[in-house]
Amino acid sequence: MHTFLTISRLLSGMFRPQYFPVVGFLVLFLFTYMSLMPWQYKASVLTLVLLGTVLLPRWTVRIWRHLNGLPLHLLRHRQNRYFPYMIGILYYVFTLHILSQFHLPTYMRGIIISALMIQVTCAIINIFWKISTHSAGAGAVCGALVAFGILFSFNPLPWLCLSILVTGLVGTSRMLLRQHTLAQVTTGALVGTICGFIGIIIPWS
């Protein structure tokens, strides 16, 4: 059992929902025609996404916890998640605004839009019920793969199967760690998949 818990903690740490936008941009810069862009441009965009969706929200929440004397484990409670959700939403909106200055293709901005939709949806659900954002982040990859497969006319099935497997493993790890129930991880994965698809496939302008 100890081994399963160790693996579960590792999976939870590796597949945090905040990493979805960074992974999305990294994949596009490595495996699409965007790889032809100058490395300075790619580095600037990735740095901005990393700061706006991972580092700044995390640092802000850490400072907030320190000022309020709130231990990390208490963020598991639904009532303590409102501030982190709001901070995440604000930073995502700010990041989306800054990225608009880089004249990115619509589908690339759609990655941030998808992540923002997940944050907003989970924040609303959190008012009434606890939902797994880890599962939502993993599910977003599944939805995004289907959307990109449609946009670029390629077969995403091999990567989609891998993503579904990872989503299942992440959800299982959250249950083994007693952070969520089956209903919470299933709902999270469903929310992430829908938002990941809609945010990219709709022609945002």
Image (tube, rainbow, N blue to C red):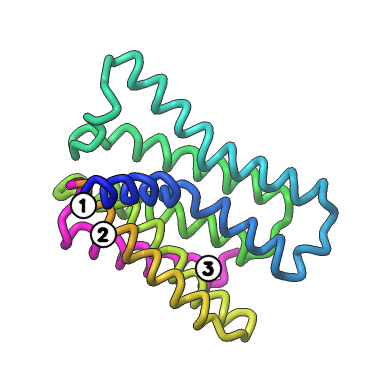
- Give the position of the C terminus as an image quadrant: bottom right
Identify the magenta region.
178-205
Of residue 130 and residue 15, the one placed in the foreground of this image is 15
| Quarter of the figure with residue 175 | bottom left
Q: Residue at x 50, y 44 (%)?
A: 92
Report the side of 171 relative to 161 (left or right): left
Which of labels 3 and 2 is toward the front? 2
In magenta stretch: residue 188: yes
Tell me which numbered mark, 3 or 2, is placed earlier along the sequence: 2
Secondary structure under the numbered disc 1 in the rendered image? helix
In magenta stretch: residue 201: yes
Report the number of discs: 3
State the mark number for residue 172.
Answer: 2
| Quarter of the figure with residue 137 | bottom left
Q: Amino acid at mark 3?
A: Ile
Secondary structure under the numbered disc 3 in the rendered image? helix
Residue 107 place in picture, x, y as percent: 61, 66
